[in-house]
């Protein structure tokens, strides 16, 4: 018999994590409206337990909290009981704020990303050390994990790995647009870019980015010309600014 894991909140992040965990756990989802829970179940393509906030008792439950940060207080007052373990994916929401609003024995802040749905999340976490091994075991089922020593580090990591799929989607789309601009069919441009991302994702695990760049960039060649164009467009500076901007939002 599978252990049950409970999601409080039924948005995109909850669905992505549940996709990665559904083979290991029985899934329970708590939300505001039953019709949205029905949609969640259909999207997950497995039978789930469903409950509304005001009907739900957290006592002795293993909880993944996936509500919007702005709704934390509103949801917290509607929940009953004391959770055994609480894993919060609320960006920028401190452990002290979580403890003020959710009754639980132990808390870990967790930041997975949307790649959890295909078992490729980069999940960072911090919190009560008594849950460190349990947290790593739980979230390794949806990808790689890293335990960080401070909440500040987690917020920085959120700006990189949590928001990163959006940044990389922008780069992917821009590369495809560039290929189309020069005359390639859109469907072919997408296939080429997809292959690029797939191969690069493997190489970057074992080879430093500088070495990869230098291996491709021949003197006076096509890569050097394209790379210079990116530098003129201040892509490097924009990426640095993106991390800072995203991090600062977590501090509000």
Image (cartoon, helix red, strand yellow):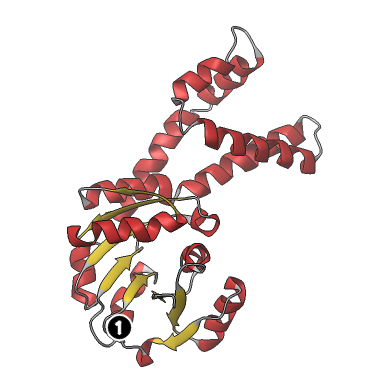
From the image, tell me which residue sits under label 1. 58
Q: Given the current orientation, which residue lies at the most extreme top position?
A: 219
Task: Give the vertical position of 35 relative to 194 (above or below).
Answer: below
SS type, badge 1: loop
Q: Is residue 93 visible?
A: no
Task: Give the vertical position of 68 relative to 51 (above or below).
Answer: above
Image location (x, y in percent) of residue 139? 39, 58
Seen in the image, is 191 located left or right of residue 226?
Answer: right
Image location (x, y in percent) of residue 114? 50, 56
Kindly indicate the quadrant of the structure image that contains residue 95: bottom left
Name the residue: 27% across, 57% down: 133
Q: Given the current orientation, which residue lies at the most extreme bottom position?
A: 55
Q: Residues within 10 Å of mark 1 (few under 14, many from 20)?
A: many
Kindly indicate the quadrant of the structure image that contains residue 186: top right
Say which of 116 and 5 sits in front: 5
Q: Given the current orientation, which residue lies at the most extreme front position?
A: 1
Image location (x, y in percent) of residue 225? 62, 16
Name the residue: 36% across, 70% down: 64
Q: Is residue 44 visible?
A: yes
Say which of 94 and 63 sits in front: 63
Seen in the image, is 143 located left or right of residue 71?
Answer: right
């Amino acid at each position: 018999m599978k252990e049950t894991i409970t999601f409080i909140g039924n948005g995109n992040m909850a669905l992505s994590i549940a996709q990665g965990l559904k083979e290991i756990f029985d899934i329970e989802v708590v939300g505001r409206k039953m019709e949205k829970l029905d949609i969640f179940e259909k999207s997950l393509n497995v039978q789930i337990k469903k409950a509304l906030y005001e009907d739900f008792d957290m006592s002795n439950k293993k909880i993944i909290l996936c509500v919007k940060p702005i709704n934390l207080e509103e949801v917290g007052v509607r929940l009953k009981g004391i959770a055994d373990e609480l894993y919060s994916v609320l960006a920028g929401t401190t452990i002290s704020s979580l403890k003020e609003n959710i009754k639980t024995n132990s808390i870990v802040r967790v930041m997975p990303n949307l790649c959890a749905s295909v078992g490729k999340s980069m999940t960072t976490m911090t919190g009560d050390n008594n849950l460190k091994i349990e947290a790593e075991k739980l979230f390794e089922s949806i990808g790689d994990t890293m335990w960080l020593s401070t909440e500040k580090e987690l917020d920085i990591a959120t700006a990189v790995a949590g928001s990163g799929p959006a940044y990389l989607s922008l780069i992917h789309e821009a590369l495809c647009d560039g290929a189309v601009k020069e005359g390639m069919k859109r469907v072919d441009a997408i296939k080429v870019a997809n292959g690029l991302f797939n191969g690069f994702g493997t190489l970057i695990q074992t080879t430093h980015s500088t070495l990869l760049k230098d291996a491709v960039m021949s003197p006076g060649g096509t890569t050097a010309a394209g790379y210079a164009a990116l530098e003129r467009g201040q892509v490097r500076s924009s990426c640095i600014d993106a991390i800072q901007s995203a991090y600062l939002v977590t501090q509000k």
